[in-house]
Amino acid sequence: MDTKRLLSLLKQYPIVTIGLLLSVIFGLVVYFRHSQVSALDSQIRTAEQQYQVMLRNVANAKSLEEQIETVKGYNEQLDGRLIDRRDLTRNLNYFYDFEKKFDLKITSLSQVGGITPATPADYLPKLEQFDIVRFSVSVEGSYSSVVRWLKYLENGRYFISIGELSLSQRNDPTDRSLVQMNVQIDVLGSRPPSQ
């Protein structure tokens, strides 16, 4: 079929020709419009999700100022419970003050120094603002006094972890109720700002 014959056939049936032409145009419009509709649907879904997030944020923000003040209060309390490894006199006196209170005798006390806390796994946050200040303490006293002292330390002013501990009976023939304890105590401290 050549083009002249096709043109004459189309001229002979103009209604059919116009119908076919409109059908092709309509088909192309539907095809291109359908691809845009799915893109617009995904944009609408994304906008609806963002709107829901905004609504939740607005609902949660009603008490945000109170929550911020509460967190600031907790941070101040935390700062008060951290030991400063540079203040050696205050740190050692913290332990010596227990001698009278618990009827103990501290025979040896030393602050070993600051240790950066180890992070047990890569996915946990690094504790870069904290130090661990280690103390090596030897005390003598009755068993009940030593136990009360340890319990007090666990619930005391600072955050502590008791490491190595050895307990033995003193070789004192006059008083067999005395024990000697050597303990390693790790205290959570604030890192000096120079580091």
Image (spheres, rainbow, N blue to C red):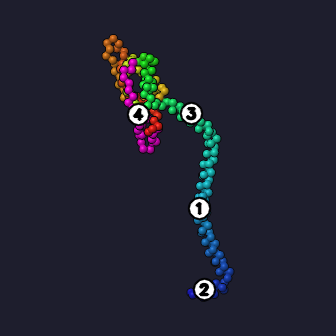
First along the sequence among labels 3 and 2: 2
Looking at the picture, does residue 162 appear above or below residue 54? above
Q: Secondary structure at mark 4?
A: strand
Circles 3 and 4 in contact, beta carbons < 8 Å? no
First along the sequence among labels 2 and 4: 2
First along the sequence among labels 2 and 1: 2
Is 106 magenta? The answer is yes
Give the number of the disc on residue 6.
Answer: 2
Q: Secondary structure at mark 2?
A: helix
- Where residue 119 appears, x then y in whole percent? 42, 40
Q: Which residues are magenta?
A: 105-131
Residue on which the image places disc 4: 114
Placement of the N terminus among the 4 image quadrants: bottom right
As rendered, which of 127 and 142 lies closer to the eye? 127
Spatial separation of the CA atoms under disc 3 and disc 2: 88 Å
- Where residue 180 appears, x then y in whole percent? 35, 20
Looking at the picture, does residue 130 appear above or below residue 7? above
- Say left or right for 25 vs 84: right
Q: What residue appears at the point 44 percent right and 29 percent down from the top-left corner?
A: 87
Q: Amino acid at mark 3?
A: Gly
Say which of marks 3 and 1 sits in front. 3
Spatial separation of the CA atoms under disc 3 and disc 4: 26 Å
Residue on which the image places disc 3: 73
Say which of marks 3 and 4 sits in front. 4
First along the sequence among labels 3 and 1: 1
How packed mark 2 is, by other alpha carbons closer than 10 Å (few <14, some 14-19, many 20 or more), is few
In which quadrant of the rendered view does residue 114 lie? top left
